Amino acid sequence: MERINIFRPAIIATLIGATFSANLHADVQFRGAVNSSLINQSFDTDSEDSRYQDRNVIQISPTLTGVYASKKANATASATQRYQRFDVDEGSRSSNFTEFNYAGNLNIIDNVFQIFGQGAQRYQSYRPETYVSSDYLLNSDDLSKITSHSAGARLNIPRGDVWGLSLTGLYFESESDDSLEEAEDNTNTFNRFIDSTGVSVNADLTNGDWFRNIYWNVTGSYRRTDRQDRGLFESVLVNGVIGFRVYGDLGLITTATHEENDIEGELANFSARFGAQFSKFDTYGIGFNYRPAAERFFRLTLNKVSTDGEDDGKTFVGVATSWQFSPRTNLQAQYSRRYYGEAGQFSLSHGTRRLRTTISYQERTTTFSNMIFDTVDAGTFVCPAGSVDIIDCFQPDTLDYELQPGEQVVQFSQVIPELTDQVILRRQLGGSIGYQQRRLKLVFDTRYVDSDYSVDNRQQIQRIVGLNASLQVGARSSVYSRIQFAKMDFTVNGESRDNNSRIYSIGLRSNLSRNLSVNADVRYLDGGGNQVLRRDAVDLNETRISLGLTYNFQSNRQ
């Protein structure tokens, strides 16, 4: 298959042009920052690799962000150019990295039909065992540039007398360059040259108000991903329920699910484990439903499996609930079966004036390209676009907070997906507890991800626990800190290995004026005994001392 060309910026420019031309009365804002830092890196390791020599670094990072907001449309774009020069015993060397992200939304018909688009360019390590320890200053040779673009449309027909419909379609493209390091072997070919395009459609059809004693709902999703080196991957998942009120809020309910997956010539591992069930898996059930309101129900069903695999004819008990206890507390949970066996989903959100909690668990069959555009679980803090420092962030006082142009929800301890074009069976559990009062901001994050791969007989488990905090200690000064523990377990052909790493950091930021601030921080990385690097295993410890100066500017035009 010919190499797929990346999504052309001209299409995005056309959408943005239409947005601006359709909205003459809008608020346009430009803001930026220039950060310059002097950094000292010292290493404690038995490795003789030249990349682990003590050094001083000068880093300059200008960032420009534009925000457009009107009654009909909004758009945000941000770009950062990062220049850094390393001074070591042998001399000096320099490197440059360019990052950008953009997102826009245009309301063609208010609350009914919208078009949207987004894109980004970022870097991550192609070596899964160095995700935590690799950044622009450490192991930067392992970084691979990843570019992604998407455009879509959303149709929402409000619930009327007969039915209500929500329909979303998306086209997406993603591409990664080879690693910045020219590998001497072929051991990482699965983690290089990601190049794919895809489409996805999600639909939700529900009954209208005319149905008094009968209620029904059908949800479906379709996803197709064309991968340059691994061919086509298609998946279909449909769920349907029909309920009948018998007495008060109690009723009978019937359920059905249909799931199909297709991978072109790439079932070495999944075929051996799941057989024909991976290709087609259906269930049918009947049971009881307690439903005081559309957003509050609890159902219990007895289900039967229909498939060409070994689970054909088996029965199981299914449970599902959605319960909004109050405007600040919402619970959703489901237990069922899919082609890989027992399956479940869970989501809990709770918020008070100062404390907010989110917990979620999801299982899905996906690819790296799909995960770029999927939101598995959200954090509890909202930050300005391009910023991930908790000092600049705030915690909304409602669960239904709508992001404003130039804002994003941040997961401070996010688990990075592996850079691979294989199909992945991914189970992810995540939780965040955020607290904010006048001077103190605190967030505790934890993530657990269990991934199985379609080709390799390989399982990868990632565990991350993080604590981020900031405390305002004066009218213009704040102390901030970060602690993160990460563990990665690998099982390849029955052989298990693991890698642990810890990060501790503390810093101080002081505003010298409205636009000028200075910061100093110390970071310590305990890389642990890395057993899975293709290079020789090393014990890597790094101490990083930074002194920085940041100038911010902002302009507004109505």
Image (spheres, rainbow, N blue to C red):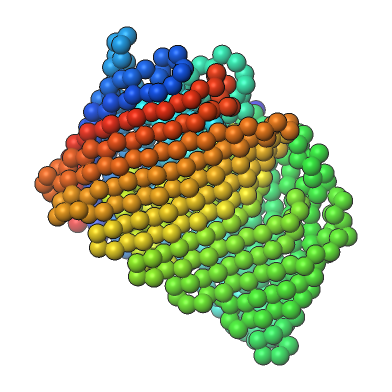
- In the figure, residue 59 lies in which quadrant? top left
Quadrant of the rendering where the C terminus is positioned: bottom left
16 w.r.t. 401: above or below? above
475 w.r.t. 292: above or below? above
Q: Is residue 44 visible?
A: yes
Q: Position of residue 191 (x, y in %)?
A: 58, 29
Q: Position of residue 313 (x, y in %)?
A: 88, 60
Instruction: Name the residue located 33 percent from the left edge and 19 percent from the top edge.
Output: 54
Q: Position of residue 456 (x, y in %)?
A: 70, 32
Instruction: Name the residue located 55 percent from the left edge and 69 percent from the top edge.
Output: 331
Instruction: Name the residue located 43 percent from the left edge and 50 percent from the top edge.
Output: 411
Which residue, as the protein is rendered here, is positioned at the far top?
90
Q: Position of residue 161 (x, y in %)?
A: 59, 81
Closest to the observer, 343 or 193: 343
Instruction: Name the residue located 64 percent from the left edge and 56 percent from the top edge.
Output: 221
Q: Is residue 24 visible?
A: no
